[in-house]
Image (spheres, helix red, strand yellow):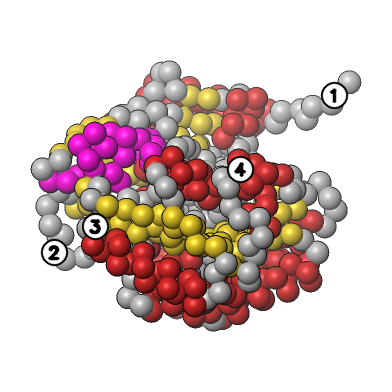
Amino acid sequence: MLNLPVPDPQVMARRAEIAAHLRTIVPDGVVADDATLTAYDGDALTAYRQIPLVCVLPKTAEQVSAILSYATRENIRLVPRGAGTSLSGGALPLADGIVLSLTRMSRVLEIDIENRCIVVQPGVTNASVTRAVEAAGFYYAPDPSSQIACTIGGNVAENSGGIHCLKYGLTTHNLMGVELALLDGERVRLGGKHADDGGLDLLGIVAGSEGLLGVVTEATLRILPRAPASRTMLLGFPTVSDAARAVGAIIAEGIIPAALEFMDKRCIEAVEAFCAPGYPADAEAILICEIDGMDAEVRDAGERITAIARASNAHEIRDCRDNADRARVWSGRKAAFAAMGRLRPDMLCMDGTIPRRELPHVLSEIAAMSEHYGLGCCNVFHAGDGNLHPLIVFDVMAPGDLERAEAFGADILKLCVKVGGVLSGEHGIGVEKKALMGEMFSDPDLAQQQRLKCAFDAQSLLNPGKVFPTLHACVEQGHMHVHGGHLPYPNIPRM
């Protein structure tokens, strides 16, 4: 007979009280039983799980404002959540907090082709934005691998990128405006269809703020016309170093591909077994290169890239024949994360960014770390801008595997910073990397960042416990550090 834990009466009473009030705001959108709440117990960072106290799923901006206002009055912590595809633990819930899930806010509010933008609610999926405008010959450039599931609200929170971020930028470069709900329930508009506002760049701090400052209830996104011509090339190399050197040579030549993606042999083999995209079996590394623009521009760039690939010892240079062939080649890259399940049950996806010139050195060091920790690692990443995504595969049920995987990942990120890179290119800090923030930022840097957090959230109610390695309390005279895990303010999260 299965022995289930006995529910804490105080916790159950608190849950019932909060759920009852939330139902007065969202009558048909409150989840308050453990069995259903397991669907909201974490995100794609599989190592961490926590069942929240309650989950609420609003449909309107007015409901979001009412929820935030109630939580502020009652001093209840909240974790905003999109589709849960975050890879850094950004949507990890709190046992005593509300998960504010925005997936039901999924309407396209306006398509404005004349001004080349689209206005959407935060629960609209990334791929749905392009589907909404493709008949008019337009598309939305940021395209994370999880684009069929991930939502625009989450993309804004994490400043997501994708395979086309090299030429067309991350979410922040394609975000024109937001409506942001603040903790007191007030909603403010930042940016919009017009040119950039004067004064402080408040829109810029919202992109990538990881749900710490407010809740996006509406986003205005830039859409782009499809290029007249495009070409996708598959380049196979006998060594990882050859492929890495080719990346640097392509960019040094002044060519900015729409996408330039890298996969190593271990990743190629897993992807081939998963979805058979037709990658060369004898390659130690491949590059998938997409170029777009005017016909003459694409032809010229293709010829120059071919010459660079040959000079870098490429033994296979293949042009995609048609749209079906192009889709097949890209399907393998999009499926790389899912394909890791064929190697081990669990995976940590790292997200450091480095100068391109350091690619050969860093990839060599990652291979040595893999041997040291006794764990497999596949490399698949946005090579053009040096945004690494080493996939560390392990079995969380095997003693010591998780600890080794986390130490391996930390060493990769420390190396990225050491060679002049950063801790995150597009996945955010969340809970996964917060202990490493000191590798990149000084104490005064971190204190200044927390002053910004406190300007929006003096009670530390929005997504607490994320991003910052050291907790502070927002007080009138400045910041107060927490020592020894003791907190003089009960509203600050205990870690």
Q: Image height check: is 483 above or below 12? A: below
| Image position, residue 385 (x, y; %) | 43, 68
Mark 4 and mark 1 in contact (Cβ < 8 Å)? no
Residue 360 painted magenta = no
Mark 1 vs mark 4: give the one in front. Answer: 4
Which residue has dot 1 on it? Answer: 2
Residue at image x 37%, y 24%? 25
Q: First in sequence, mark 1 or 2: give its number.
A: 1
How would you rate the neighbour count of disc 1 (Cα within 10 Å): few for under 14, some for 14-19, many for 20 or more? few
Residue 376 in view: yes
Which residue has dot 3 on it? Answer: 295
Residue at image x 47%, y 37%? 149
Amino acid identity at mark 4: Ala
Q: CA distance from mark 4 to mark 3?
A: 30 Å
How would you rate the neighbour count of disc 2 (Cα within 10 Å): few for under 14, some for 14-19, many for 20 or more? few
Q: Is 205 placed left or right of 444 in the picture?
A: left
How would you rate the neighbour count of disc 3 (Cα within 10 Å): few for under 14, some for 14-19, many for 20 or more? few
Q: Secondary structure at mark 2?
A: loop
Which label is found at residue 198?
A: 2
Q: Image height check: is 358 above or below 16? A: below
Q: First in sequence, mark 3 or 1: give its number.
A: 1
